[in-house]
Image (cartoon, grey):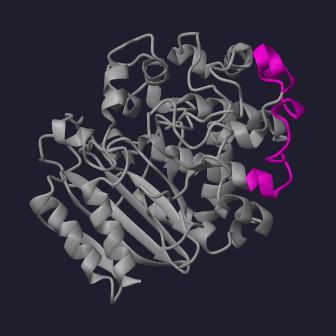
Amino acid sequence: MIVEGTTSPGFEPVREEFARNFAERGELGAACAVQVGGETVVDLWGGYRDRAGREPWQRDTMATVFSATKGVASMALAVAHSRGLFDYDALVTKYWPEFGRSGKENVTVRQLLGFQAGLPTVDTLLTAELIADADRLGDVLAEQAPAWEPGSAQGYHPVMGGLYASQLLRRVDPKGRLIGQYLAEELLEPLGLEFYIGTPPSVPEERIAELVPAKLGLRDLTTPGGVPARMVLDFLLPWTLTAKSFSNPRIRDITSLGRPPWRGLDLPAANGVGTARSLAALYGEFATGGARLGLDPPTLRAIEAEPAPPGGGSRDRVMHLAEARFSLGFWKPFPAWRFGTDSRAYGTPGAGGAFGMADPATGTGFGYVPNRLGRRLWNDPRERALREAVLRCL
C-alpha cells in the first residue's frame, strides 16, 4: 500500500504506524494529520476512498466523521463564547425562553453541552424535513421533557446535543446562524480550512469517501473502549433510553449520515465531513491559544478544566459506561481512556474510529479520518497506534 504525504524529521514513526494500519489492522482508506506549535508535522493519506478498492484516496479526500463532529461544533461555540455571545453558566432560558418548558427551566448552558440536561432523545420522529426547518425544530426541542432531573446525572446525547446547541447559537448570534454556517464563516474561512456541517451539493461526490460499515464481534464487547454488553442489549429493546437515543432519526444504518439528504443538514453532532488535516488544524489552533480566532483565555481555561461530575456521579446512563467525562461538548481524559499528556487535553471520537483532539500541554492538534468503520467507542486500534506514536515523537 502506497502511503502519501509528509512527515517532519522526528515524526517518521507516525508514518510507519500509518503504513502498518494498512498491512496489519485492516485499513481501507484513511488520513492522519498533526500540528505542533502551529506547524504541520504530519500530513498523511493512503488507501482507497471506495469500498471496491479502485479509487485512490487523494490529498483532498474527505470523509464523514460522525460524532467527531461534536468537537468541531463545540469549537464554534467556544469562539461565540469568547465573543461574549453567551455564558456557559447562565440558564439556557436567558437566551431561549421557550426552552424552559416541560421541566427544563433550570438547565444551564454548561449542563446542556455536558450531556447533563437529560435530553438524549426526543419523542417526535426526526425526519430530514423537520431538521431542515429550524423554526419548527426549535419548537419541538423546546417542548421535550428531560429523561432525568437535569444536573443529577449524565448520558451521552448522540444527536440531540448538537441540535440543541445549534438552536442556542441561532438565538445568540446577531446574524441568527446555525452552527454549520457559523463554523464556515467564523472559523474555517479565517483559517483557510475545509470542513462541513451540512455539506453543500456543490462538493463533488468523488471527493467524499465511501463508508464501509463495521460488524460487531464478541471481542469488541470485552475490549477497553469497546461497546458495553448492556449497551448492545439495550439497542435490541426499543423502549430503552439507549435505543431511543440512537434510533432517532430513524436511518437505515449509520453510513446514511454520510449520504444525502442527511449529509446536507445542520447536524452538529453527527454528519461532519472533512479531512484529517482540517481536524488537526482546528484543534492545533485551540491548543496554541487560538489567537487567529480571537479566543480568550477564560474560554480556553473552561474547556481545559476538569469537569465537575453531576450529582449522580460520572456513570453514563445512555452508553452504560462506568465512567465518562464530558465538558462543554468535548470528551475529557478519564482512567479508562487516557489521551493527551495531561488532564487539559480534550477532543471527540466518532463512530468508526475518527478522532480529533487538542493537547495544550504540547501545543498539539491531532486528526484521524478513516472510511472503513471500526467497532470501538474510543481507542480504535488504528487511531490509537497513530496517537501514541505522535506522543512518543513529542
Above or below, 299 relative to 146 = below
Which residue is at 25% across, 74% downward? 15
Say if 205 sits above or below 147 in the image.
below
Which x, y percent locates residue 360?
59, 73
Q: Residue at x 42, y 61 (%)?
A: 367
Q: Nearer the viewer, residue 143 or 310?
A: 310
Part of the protein shown in magenta: 79-105
For the residue pair 66 and 239, the one nearer the viewer reads as 239
- Residue 255's place in the image compared with 134, above or below, is below
Find the residue positioned furthest to the bottom: 9
Identified at 53% across, 30% down, the residue is 159
Residue 91 falls within the magenta-colored stretch: yes
Residue 205 appears in view: yes
Q: Report x, y in % for residue 387.
A: 36, 67
Of residues 94 and 261, which is closer to you in this image? 94
Quadrant in which the C terminus is drawn: bottom left
Q: Can residue 58 be seen in the rendering of this structure? A: no
Q: Residue at x 76, y 51 (%)?
A: 80
- Magenta span has 249? no
In the picture, the quarter occupied by the N terminus is bottom left
Q: Is residue 249 left or right of residue 143?
A: left
Question: Which one is in front, 184 or 366?
Answer: 366
Whole-percent x, y for residue 43 in the image: 36, 71
